[in-house]
Image (cartoon, grey):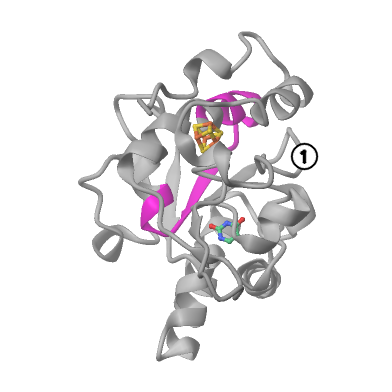
Amino acid sequence: MAVIGAERFVPPGADMRELREAVDACRGCALYRDATQAVFGDGPADAKVMMVGEQPGAREDIAGAPFVGPAGRLLDRAMVEAGLDRKRIYVTNAVKHFKFTRPDDGKPRIHKKPGRTEVVACRPWLVAELGQVQPDLLVCLGATAAQAVLGPAFRLTQHRGEVIVPDDGDFAGCRVLATVHPAAVLRSRDQDEVYAGLVDDLGVVAKQIGGYA
Ligand code: URA
Ligand code: SF4
């Protein structure tokens, strides 16, 4: 199937509620076919901080909300340590449908990293969310989100924790900070160190917005 992109599925002039209602009907790429539902962002539309992950995981695919599984719990803990209140942050993903493979032995579905094509196809939803929230700071969790926002040449390892303002494209003029993905902490062999790095970067976020979000 040709990847047509989400653009034509995003209702023009829609508010947050209308966007949320429309996303499940998106056929912008093939991922809608096997996923349970689209997972839109969650949180206040007037949040100062908007966080972007990669894509919903198996738990999020069932629950219909972002970051409710193990990575979400770790993120919650890191936010608290950094002085951020999740309830006051808008949390979403670069890709709205869960991409996975299904083992034939009935074991749980296995997360598959979305490709550049899917990230680009889904970006109109992210741009629409950004237009509604208009955050002071856009926080990218992991390389997929960072490259969705800052382009494929962006290197997370070199520029994590920095405030970057893109001068062209859909995110021009927006203040962006990229950090590691909470799932990368869980996968890491040195969890304490990677976790501490995440908390440090979220500390920069808290400072940027003038304290408790
Ligand atoms: N990982 C993500 O990137 N997003 C989620 O919502 C859950 C896990
Ligand atoms: Fe549309 Fe994004 Fe889902 Fe693809 S992943 S069908 S572009 S909402």
Identity of the residue drawn at 38% across and 41% down: 148
Is residue 198 a member of the stretch shown in magenta?
Answer: no
* Residue 179 visible within the image: yes
Q: Residue furthest front?
A: 104
Mark 1 = which residue?
Answer: 44
The front one of 114 and 54 is 114
Q: Is residue 135 above or below residue 110?
A: above
Q: Is residue 129 magenta?
A: yes
Distance from mark 1 CB to nearest ligand 1 atom below 8 Å? no
Q: Quadrant of residue 165 in the image? A: top left
Q: Which picture quadrant has residue 184?
A: bottom left
User: Disc 1 marks which amino acid?
Assistant: Pro
Q: Position of residue 157 (x, y in %)?
A: 27, 66
User: Is residue 174 in view from this perspective?
Assistant: no
Question: Circle 1 sits in a helix, a strand or a loop, which is it?
Answer: loop
State whether residue 53 is above or below residue 157.
above
Q: Residue at x 48, y 18 (%)?
A: 7
Q: Nearer the viewer, residue 12 or 178?
A: 12
Front in this rendered view, residue 204 or 44? 44
| Residue 51 placement (x, y as % from top left) | 57, 49
Residue reaching furthest to the left: 153
From the viewer's perspective, is 92 left or right of 155? Answer: right
Image region (quadrant) for ligand 1: bottom right
Q: Residue furthest top?
A: 12
Crowd class of label 1 (few under 14; some 14 to 19; many from 20; radius 10 Å): some
The residue located at (60%, 49%) in the rendering is 209
User: Which residue is at a point 66% across and 59% down the rendered structure image?
Assistant: 67
* Magenta segment boundaries in residue numbering: 127-145
- Tell me where residue 95 appears, x and y as whole percent: 51, 43
The correct choice, above or below, for 31 with respect to 170 in the image is below
